[in-house]
Image: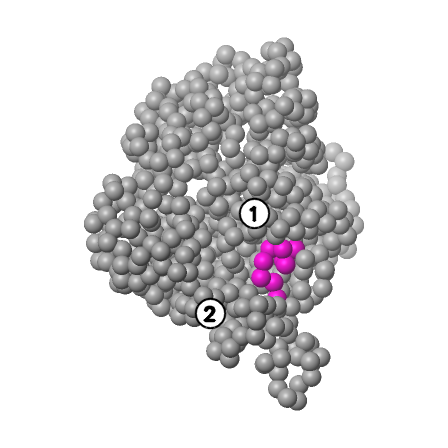
Amino acid sequence: MPKSPQMKLLEHLQTSWPAALRLRASGDDAVEVPPTHPLAGEVNALLRGATASLPAISANSIRWNTFAADPAALPAAVEQLRAWIIPSFAWEVEQDAYLVDRAGEALADIAAAAGFRAIYRWQSGDRELARISAKLAAARHLDERPPPAPFVRAPSLMDLRRQYASALAVGDQKSADAAVAAISEHQLESPANVAFLRYRLWDRFLEALRITQDVDLDRFVRQEMPQRARLAVARAFHAIYLAEFEARGDLAGSLAAYEQQIRPRLAGLIPLLRASEGVEAARLLAYEARARDSTVSADVRAVDDEWTKRLLSVDASAPASAEALSDEDQLLEAAGRRDWTEVQRVGLRMLHAEPASELVRTLLLRSLLAIPNGELENQLAPAAASATTSPTQTRQRAKPTVQSWAQWLAAIHANDPQQSAAADSFARSENRSSLNDLSAAELDVIVDQLDDLYTAEGDADALSRGRIVAGLAELISDLAHQPEFPRREWASLYLGLLRLWSVLNAGSLDPLDASVLLTLADASLTHKVAAEKEVAELLAQWWRTRRVWAQVPFALDAIELLTERTTAQGTAEALWLDAGDFLRRDLERVAPTDRALWRRVGRGIGFDDQTIDAYLPPLPAVAKRESEDPISAAQLTRIAIVWRRQDLANNAVRRIAKRTNAEVFVVYEEHPRGQTTHALGADVILFVWGNVSHAVFHELENVPRARFAYVPVPTVANVERTLERWAISQLKSTQAS
């Protein structure tokens, strides 16, 4: 068998080696390479055609040759030699250090025949052979060793809860899903709590069927379930089994569906609901009252909802003039429902008014096992303390608790370890009471506390900042869940949150943080005209704090929000020019569709074409032909935009219509009628988050999720970009299939 070219190259090199270093042939085309040989790694690499360094030894020096099959691989090999060997133990030759595709030299010809097109030549003293051989072996061992398993640090529960709450607030389902998945993967919450987080997520994005079909639901319903998870389940069953009948006005059909589909599974859950938790809760309580032939509480009768009134008036067993329950009866009823939040609310009122009976005290003590409450513990301390326990010891035993957002802010501001722990527990709690019952006095307290935190922000350490931001994300999520969001009477609250969020998260590159900021800015501007200048400056400052590519989408949304919702023309102009100056430094990174979008926004501000061209020149004709518009390429026939702001929605329709032949229309009605019906046949339905009627959303419940596209920030540019991203994903899915 003829010898391989690699063997011939090795034999050529070995002619200069001392006998002790030469390798013995084990056949015509094989050689024995003992593991203990100083150059074993290099020889084996050469024989398999990999980059290798081997010597040609003379009397007074050693000429080393580093062989590479591909000339492009040689620079990396040389850099490694310079890191390990040169110049400490060897040196580079002054002439012809590199031989690439060199013909006519014996060594180069033999190496080329063996597949090595490039050679790097270097030199060392004759006494450095052993040391250099050891260095080469060490370097090769390090290169060939499998990489160590990466250390994955588990994210903190606080950070993941913040991500989850922020994502729910702005309508980012993908980020919320990722947060729940990470919490589950790292076992940061119990399986039941993970399931409850998923119920809230599915409720927020109206995936009611996933809740009703969850395999663990029936088991969870029989256990103590957090208030918000309980409400999510109730809303899901209402959407799946009752909403259609109610939309048709079919009372008999809805009563039959309740008896057959809902009551057998949720009979123990529905009495725990409160009418203040929303129209679905009030209606379910009314259905249950009819099924039990029992009275309903005064708060259910007070609900301003025609369907609830119809349930209670047609063949209702209880007269409309039923007397209101006494405090003690309310407490006993709440205890029977295991509604410990309501037990404590009524119980505290009773304790402040007059001495309570032993039964009432017993029930209040039982409620503390489910929900800690420092105020209630202090009120009950004399009864709970034994004869040998002093009042001082009783006070020491009672731990501080937080039961409202006002108390949470006070605990955070106090910066006391025990109060901070109580604040964290409240922020993570799934049993927080609804914000619907927030009084004007409580609102004023919260706004003042937000201002105090805002002015003291510089004193907060990293841990405190993280705790504050995580809690604020939960508060903002609670606010964004309100059906009337944004509410006129809460405008000062939105502005206070905007100030604090902007300073605590300044410089953040997390898109969720920017989306929350824009959501709060939009809410503040909706009902607080006097805040225009301050809101505009906060948005501009967010961009100026960190001008990077990751913030470019935020800058565009901020500019559009300012031009559409404020008279702060100067701030919008300055922000566009600043961002345009940033973009023109590397125009190749700006996608053609984004460039066109920035140019349109510039014209909307009032810049002339000459000014716009100086920052973002139009694409050359050739580039325009080569860049295909994804919205046009998707070949859509019908696009629905669900947005109650008709003026902005119509602007979005006009801009999108220029990029597609599809029918583009707006759904702005609050009750599902013709517009909603027309949207059922759309290729894609764009939901401007926070501005969608729940009734319309429920009507579209059965539309496949793949046709939904959520628009978290209410600007025309974001509607356009959301559609573009959706179109790109659809094109990729089509190509993959």
At x 33%, y 35%, the residue is 672
Q: Position of residue 397 (x, y in %)?
A: 65, 77
Q: Position of residue 202 (x, y in %)?
A: 40, 50
Residue under circle 1? 476
At x 22%, y 45%, the residue is 250
Question: Magenta segment, which residues?
Answer: 401-409
Against 236, residue 194 (above or below) is below
Residue under circle 2? 328
Tell which circle, 1 or 2, labels the residue nearer the N-terminal end.
2
Of circles 1 and 2, the one toward us is 2
At x 77%, y 44%, the residue is 91
Q: Nearer the viewer, residue 529 or 15?
A: 529
**As shown in the figure, which amino acid type bears the numbered disc 2?**
Glu
Q: Nearer the viewer, residue 617 or 235?
A: 235
At x 59%, y 39%, the residue is 491
**Label 2: how many residues lie within 10 Å, few (<14), some (14-19) or many (20+)?**
some
The answer, for residue 555, to whether it is visible in the render is no
Give the distance between the C-alpha atoms of the residues marked 1 and 2, in whole angstroms.
35 Å
* Mark 1, secondary structure of its residue: helix
Quadrant containing the C terminus in the rendered view? top left
Give the tally of numbered discs: 2
**Label 1: how many residues lie within 10 Å, few (<14), some (14-19) or many (20+)?**
many
Magenta span contains residue 405: yes
Magenta span contains residue 668: no
Q: Position of residue 433 (x, y in %)?
A: 51, 57
The answer, for residue 533, to whether it is visible in the render is yes
Q: Position of residue 65 (x, y in %)?
A: 65, 44
* Mark 2, secondary structure of its residue: helix
Q: How is the image coloured?
A: one colour
Q: Residue furthest bottom?
A: 388
Disc number placed over residue 659 in the picture, else none: none
